[in-house]
Amino acid sequence: MIFEKPLTHGRLIKRYKRFLADITLDNGDVVTAHCTNSGTMKSCLENNAEVYLTPVNDPKRKTKFTWEMIKINNDWIGINTGNPNKLAYDAVLNGDIEKLKGYTEVKREVKFEDSRFDVMAKNNSETCFIEVKNVTLKEGKYARFPDAVTTRGKKHLETLMRVKEQGMRAVMLYIIQRSDVEIFAPAKDIDPDYAKTLNKAFKLGVEIIPIQAKVTPEKIEFTKELPFEL
């Protein structure tokens, strides 16, 4: 995913009310940016850290910037939770993920029962529902999800199990927007119910695919699939 327009550089003052962040731009101006990430952002917040923002020219928006990434320990971390859905859709459409190749029809935001999944892919032999999650939490060499209790995430897992029960393919696609981790695992200490449900879903045939992405101010691109531990 290539950023369509040049990003704006600054430094983080603070993030507050979950969806807002004050940023000092290079010219000294202080602006408020929209933060799409509703989690705690544990392990990817640091005062005065470098950040990049997307300028937004929308008269309906109160904030004129969207926060895209932050630099922690010389590594850019993608914190915009909207980007993984775009990345996933394009990757499945173009066959860029080895385990998700061969689909001739790919759609975004497709409803199944009482849930809406990020991607649905089809070919002549199967239908696949894919739920996408953005992963930024780092603990040692582990990338973990979630960074806060997520009842919505648990619901998606339960619905994916029903997808599988009906004979279709069900995939949890974790997009890890940082390069300083080696293994994916659920954050059992933060949300034990989610971790337990993920384990159950995997045993019932829901696939887990953790994909690492390299984040830069110019683009975000997939690098490799990571192993996982449950």
Image (cartoon, rainbow, N blue to C red):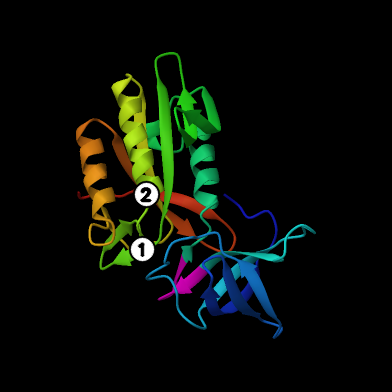
> Is residue 138 toward the left or the right of residue 50 in the image?
left
Packing grade of label 2 (10 A; few <14, some 14-19, many >=20) is few
Residue furthest to the right in view is 59
Q: Which residues are magenta?
A: 70-76
Locate residue 58: give its quadrant.
bottom right
Label 2 sits on what residue type? Thr
Left or right placement of residue 118 versus residue 100 in this view: right
Residue 168 placement (x, y as % from top left) = 35, 22
**Residue at coordinates 52% horizontally, 38% vertically from top-left?**
89
Q: What residue did someone put label 2 on?
A: 151
In this orientation, which residue lies closer to the viewer: 155 or 124?
A: 155
Q: Is residue 223 magenta?
A: no
How far apart are the two marked residues, 2 and 1, measured between alpha carbons? 18 Å
Residue displayed at 34% across by 45% down: 154
**Magenta includes 73?**
yes
Residue 44 vertical placement versus 185 (above, below): below
| Residue at horizontal 63 percent and vertical 73 percent from the top | 9
What percent of the width, then of the height, locates residue 78?
Answer: 49, 61
Residue nearer the viewer, 75 or 126: 126
Residue 86 visible somewhere in the drawing: yes
Residue at the spot of label 1: 137
